[in-house]
Image (cartoon, rainbow, N blue to C red):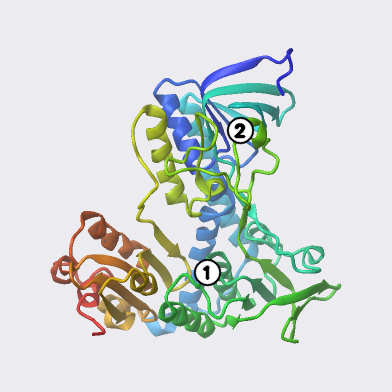
Amino acid sequence: MIDSQDVVEDVDLLVVGGGKAGKTLAMDLARAGRRVVMVERGMIGGTCVNVACIPTKSLVTSSRLARRAARAQSLGLSIGELEVDLHMLRSHKDGVVADMVALNRQQFLDSGMDFVLGTARFVAERTVAIDLNDGGRRMVRGADVVINTGTVPHMPSVPGLADAAPLNSETIMDLERIPERLVVIGGGYVGLEFAHMFAAFGSKVTVLDRGPRLLPREDADISGVLAQCLREDGVEVLTGVTVKDVARDEHAVRLMLKDGRTLLTDAVLAATGRDPVTSDLGLDAAGVRTDERGFVRVDDALATDAPHTWAVGDVAGSPQFTHVSLDDYRVVKAGITGGTRSTAGRLVPWNLFTDPELARVGLTEEQARATGRDIRVARLPVKGIPRARTMRETRGLWKAVVDRNTEEILGVSLLGPDSSEVLTVVQTAMWAGLPFTRLRDGIIAHPTMAEGLNALFTSWGD
């Protein structure tokens, strides 16, 4: 509740949480002359800059270089024995993050917004009490309010796991040493990126997943080729397994599996998803409702149940990618400024930065068949792309699904080097509604990875 002695500041826009969508909207409207307050607990720039996309991809770059250095002789080079220096790795990662944080802070100041470091809790509709990090308290009410508080790593409810002090996707980047043995619980995108990364850094890595195969949202042939690549690079992959109990002693962590096996490891990474940051926001006072998992309920315009109140990014249940959060900004800006934009029907790209990397947009073969369409499926082993051969990076599989009657591209899954860059070519064709023949017959520079699209769309399985 608002105390009668509280002084409430009224602003045009109040943003709670400084993730990609929220900070972009705050800066945009502040530059346009609106009175804007953005509250952030401490991660200047948001999760992506501090503990997710930017630091992880900085380390992915290092792990890829380590893997390439290990096979330098195949490229005609002799560079001696590789040594992974954890201090230098952390300095590299921290330096990239520090530069991005400094850039974000300066952009906040230059935009003219009122950037507040503190913890906000709703006390009424569109009104928060802010406990400032440097002491004191402010009360702010927004004509429009955006909730952008993000998510935190999920702790699985496995007996003994919490007491064993497992790593998560954030704490693993601050290790004091590279573990000799690492067990990753969870075979999703986050778990696989770290598994492949630490295998390149010298850890003996085991991935545990409850499902019958890795990445159940992908087609079985794609996930199967990726699993084989991981195994070739020293990652042990165990699927269809469940952790029954965990115990730590002074020497190791012991994981007991339900099938009776026991694993010993030096460190455990729990990579089983993320939970929304909503439990301590006072959303009831704001008139904002959440679903059974705690994510804020929103409609296709990202509007909550409360008037003039939106939620964006991970906390709204959007796909947990920064590029989706950026589009959430566009949707909410339209809602605030009188435009019309929706999350319905968005063509969202997915990228997994293993080595080789996996990039997908649109429907998988399984999803396309479930629609009842008459489809064609093309498959191209990456070794069939000349550029891949010049790099001696020939592992992987490209796959495309098209509508047989309309020649519309329904989706592609590209597992191979530089796939995330090639994906945008296909996504652009899909946005434009081009038939697959435009990529099959287009003149694409040789030798490039994108040139493989010429061959992919002639490699039909029927």
Marks 1, 2: nearer the viewer: 2
On screen, residue 161 above or below 302: below
Give the residue number, with chain letter if any, for mark 1.
63
Residue 389 in view (yes/no): no
Q: Quadrant of residue 68?
A: bottom left
Q: Quadrant of residue 367?
A: bottom left
Residue 113, x across and y down, in percent: 50, 25
The residue shown at (77%, 67%) is: 161
Residue 140 in view (yes/no): yes
On screen, residue 98 above or below 145: below
Sort mark 2 into few (<14), some (14-19) or many (20+) by Cα contacts within 10 Å: some
Residue 312, x across and y down, in percent: 50, 42
Residue 100, x across and y down, in percent: 51, 44
Secondary structure under the numbered disc 1 in the rendered image: helix
On screen, residue 330 above or below 437: above
**Disc 1 or 2, which lies upstream in sequence?**
1
The residue shown at (64%, 17%) is: 8
The residue shown at (80%, 76%) is: 252
Q: Nearer the viewer, residue 363 or 76?
A: 363
Secondary structure under the numbered disc 2 in the rendered image: loop
Q: CA distance from mark 1 to mark 2?
A: 46 Å
Tag 1–tag 2 contact (CB < 8 Å): no
Q: Quadrant of residue 85?
A: bottom right
Q: Amino acid at mark 2?
A: Gly
Q: Is residue 137 left or right of residue 74?
A: right
Q: Nearer the viewer, residue 248 or 457?
A: 457
Residue 246, x across and y down, in percent: 79, 73
Sort mark 1 into few (<14), some (14-19) or many (20+) by Cα contacts within 10 Å: many
Q: Amino acid at mark 1?
A: Ser
Q: Nearer the viewer, residue 173 or 253?
A: 253
Give the residue number, with chain letter if any, for mark 2.
287
Q: How many marks?
A: 2
